[in-house]
Amino acid sequence: MQTSGTLHIVATPIGNLGDLSPRALDTLRTVAAICAEDTRHTRQLLAHFGLERPLLALHQHNEEQQAAQLVARLQAGESLALVSDAGTPLVSDPGFRLVRAARAAGIRVSPVPGACAAIAALSVAGLASDRFSFEGFLPAKGAARRERLTRLAAEPQTLLFYESSHRIEETLDDMVNVFGFERRAVLARELTKLFETVLDGSLGELAARVKADPNQRKGEFVVMVEGAGDDADAKVVEGLRLYAKLKEHLPPSTAAKVAAELSGAPRKALYGSGD
Ligand code: SAM
């Protein structure tokens, strides 16, 4: 009877090539082929380590069709690896459909763990890490982004977001408006790379810092926001929600006064937000 191969899910570095583990190298060296999000990018990574393996493109646009063929190869006894451009596959990256198809076919799917930007960021943030939720990328459009943030505003656990240099400024502004100026946050930029920076402070301070310094807008980011810990935070979140709504019909000062009365939040935490 034919024995199936294994699908290895291999994490690659998020910047520093020294983070590719010896086991990841061994696995990549021995599989029949490597499924990669961007084959050119992965070819360069392999070349750095003196490896040359057959590469197959697997990205969000072809994953559904490719999965069946890849599962057939695995069933025929070949072992394959899946990598993404950086970090752990499937974490805001392709792979979920392939893994699901392989598991459904009874194929062994085995992880070769390594770098993941979210976990690396959390490990240096100094925010509560006993509970956290990974929120990936926020919607690109402003209204959808603010709506998503509003739904998260009262969550008590640490919130983790991925963000790119294009939108970091807008995202921080929206976070200040929805979560409040004072909510504690940490911004991890370019982890493991030359310009690695980890900034912490209130959301308002971080937004101002990023606005003031163009260098702080360059590169790749993980934004981490402290959960809505206590009653005071919850009141501000509710107050901001009411203020945003009331402002559509009332002068801002009256809207802030009414929202403060209804929510129990201090008026000064509401007035002017989002204006
Ligand atoms: N699969 C990857 C992982 O395990 O982290 C994430 C892929 S996702 C398409 C890319 C996003 O991850 C970037 O936009 C950024 O938010 C985050 N990221 C990746 N590398 C990073 C780094 N070195 N420092 C900070 N954030 C990073």
Image: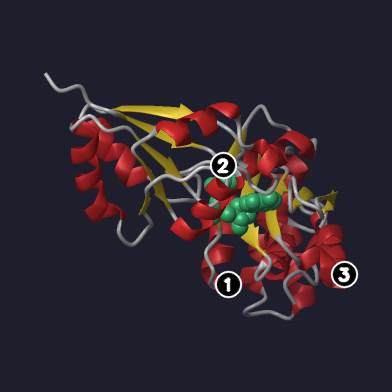
- Position of 119 with respect to 184 (left or right) is left
Give the Cα separation between the discs numbered 1 and 2: 32 Å
Q: Residues within 10 Å of mark 2 (few under 14, many from 20)?
A: many
Query: As shown in the figure, which amino acid type bears the numbered disc 3?
Result: Asp
Quadrant for the N terminus in the image: top left
Q: Residues within 10 Å of mark 1 (few under 14, many from 20)?
A: few
Q: Which residue is mark 1?
A: 142
Q: Secondary structure at mark 3?
A: loop
Depicted 202 relative to depicted 7: above or below: below
- Look at the numbered discs 3 and 2 and tell me whether their residues touch, using CB distance below 8 Å: no
Q: Which residue is mark 2?
A: 12
Q: Is residue 149 visible?
A: yes
Label 3 C-beta lies within 8 Å of the nearest ligand 1 atom: no
Query: As shown in the figure, which amino acid type bears the numbered disc 1?
Result: Gly
The x, y position of residue 106, in whole percent, is 22, 26
Q: Which residue is mark 3?
A: 213
Q: Residue at x 61, y 47 (%)?
A: 48
- Look at the numbered discs 1 and 2 and tell me whether their residues touch, using CB distance below 8 Å: no
Of tags 1 and 2, which is closer to the observer?
A: 2
Depicted 233 relative to depicted 241: above or below: above
The x, y position of residue 109, in whole percent, is 35, 29
Number of the label disc, if any, that sits on residue 83: none
Q: Earlier in the sequence, mark 3 or mark 1?
A: 1
Label 2 C-beta lies within 8 Å of the nearest ligand 1 atom: no
Q: Earlier in the sequence, mark 3 or mark 2?
A: 2
Query: As shown in the figure, which amino acid type bears the numbered disc 2?
Result: Thr
